[in-house]
Image: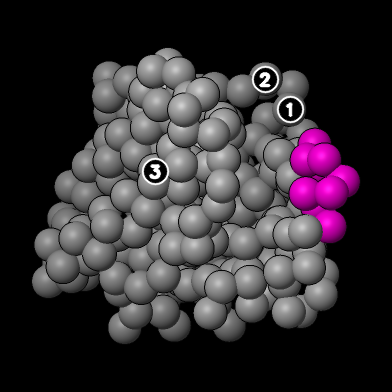
Amino acid sequence: MYGLNDRVAVVTGGYRGIGRALCVALGRAGAHVVAADVGDEAVGKETLAAVEAAGGKAELVRCDVTQSESVDAVFQDVHKRLGRLDILINNAGISRDQLLLRVSDEDIQKTYAVNVTGAIYCARAAIRPMMRAKHGRIINLASVVAELGNPGQAVYSSSKAALIGLTKTLAREYASRGVTVNAVAPGYIDTDMTRNLPEEAKKYMLGQVPLGRVGTPEDVAAAVQFLSSDEAGYITGQVLRVNGGMYV
């Protein structure tokens, strides 16, 4: 079930956290994973080792999603070398949380450059080979706060809401070419970002989760693997919420 044998998957922001879990899950399912990131290569090598330990194949590429030239070069190289491009996971993202009156212009521009513009650049680069193959999967990592809202995250939540709009529009544009486009919206997930939150904030967020536990990167990866598979071929333009009931 949900096998991805011989598929080629590009995962942006693939070196750590949810990105690493995505790479491992897709690799275990049989995909050749390309982890694209601007992070520390040593961290990327840990992800590479994790994929290989799970029985998968992976490689690391440096890709700055905020630069269209970097994105285009990476996607062209992947398609040329591997002969196909089946799956794009737009996972790269940043959060610079602050009440709106304290948010700087730089914070706004950087957040949108990575979270929104980067996803658009990557989708644009991936669409053409997918159209030619008449098959493709694009999955955008949104967030529960895109739909729920959260004080102190005006910029982040609005950037993730933009990804939902992007998802729905691309789903309509490319369904006739065999390309499905969906979003996964994680809730309170155990990552470096959430571990650094104040204890009171953690308690509050956990109290909003009916299932009563923090989600794991593997919970998110399982949803992404499903949407990447042939079994999800009749699903497009949807938001799959992985949030323990935090938003329903």
Q: Which residue corresponds to the image point at 27% horizontal and 57% vertical from the top-left?
A: 165
Using the numbered discs, state the Cα–Cα distance from disc 2 to disc 1 in whole angstroms: 5 Å
Pointer 3 residue: 159
3D distance between C-alphas at marks 3 and 2 = 25 Å
Q: Residue at x 39, y 43 (%)?
A: 159
Identify the residue shown where x is 31% and y is 64%: 181
What kind of element bears circle 1? helix
Residue 4 % position (x, y) = 51, 67
- Asked if residue 242 is among those painted magenta in the image, a careful observer would answer no
Left or right of 76 in this view: 219: right
Crowding near the residue tagged with mark 3, few <14, some 14–19, many ≥20 C-alpha atoms within 10 Å: many
| Alpha carbon separation for disc pair 3 and 1 | 26 Å
Q: Which residue is mark 1?
A: 43
Give the magenta range.
195-203
Of callouts 3 and 2, which one flags the residue occurring earlier in the amino acid sequence? 2
Tell me if mark 2 has few (under 14), some (14-19) or many (20+) residues whose alpha carbon lies within 10 angstroms of its own.
few
- Badge 1 amino acid: Val
